[in-house]
Image (tube, rainbow, N blue to C red):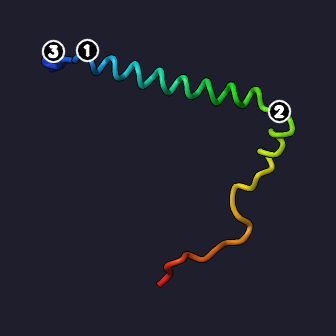
Amino acid sequence: MFDRLTFEDWSAILTAVAFILCFAAFLYFVWRALRMSKRHRDHMSNLPLESERKQPPENEQ
């Protein structure tokens, strides 16, 4: 069954390019996180994830 599958060269290149771009983005974010100053790191760790008061939906019917 798999003998009938043919892979084109461009599909292998596209997969490799996508992997390289994702890996480069990952390395960039890790580098930024490691070089972050302690003051900025503390500020980011204390940011709220949700607002403290719940807002009603705008179009509630």
The residue drawn where x is 48% and y is 25% is 21
User: Which numbered disc covers residue 24?
Assistant: none
Q: Nearer the viewer, mark 1 or mark 2?
A: 2
User: Residue 39: x, y in percent?
Assistant: 86, 39
- In screen coordinates, is 17 left or right of 27? left
Kindly state the secondary structure of the residue where label 1 is placed: helix
CB-based contact (under 8 Å), mark 1 and mark 2: no
Front disc: 2 or 3: 2
In which quadrant will I find the N terminus? top left
Q: Which residue is mark 2?
A: 37
Q: Residues within 10 Å of mark 2 (few under 14, many from 20)?
A: few
Task: Report x, y in % for residue 60.
Answer: 50, 81
Q: Residue at x 84, y 42 (%)?
A: 42
Dot 2: element: loop
Q: Amino acid at mark 1?
A: Asp
- Res 34 → quadrant: top right
- Tag count: 3
Q: Is residue 59 above or below residue 26?
A: below
Q: CA distance from mark 1 to mark 2?
A: 45 Å
Q: Which mark is residue 3?
A: 3
Percent coordinates x, y for residue 16 in the rendering: 40, 18
| 43 in relation to 16, above or below | below
| Type of amino acid under label 2 | Ser
- Mark 2 and mark 3 lie on one chain; the one further toward the N terminus is 3
Query: Is 42 drawn above or below residue 17 in the view shown?
Result: below
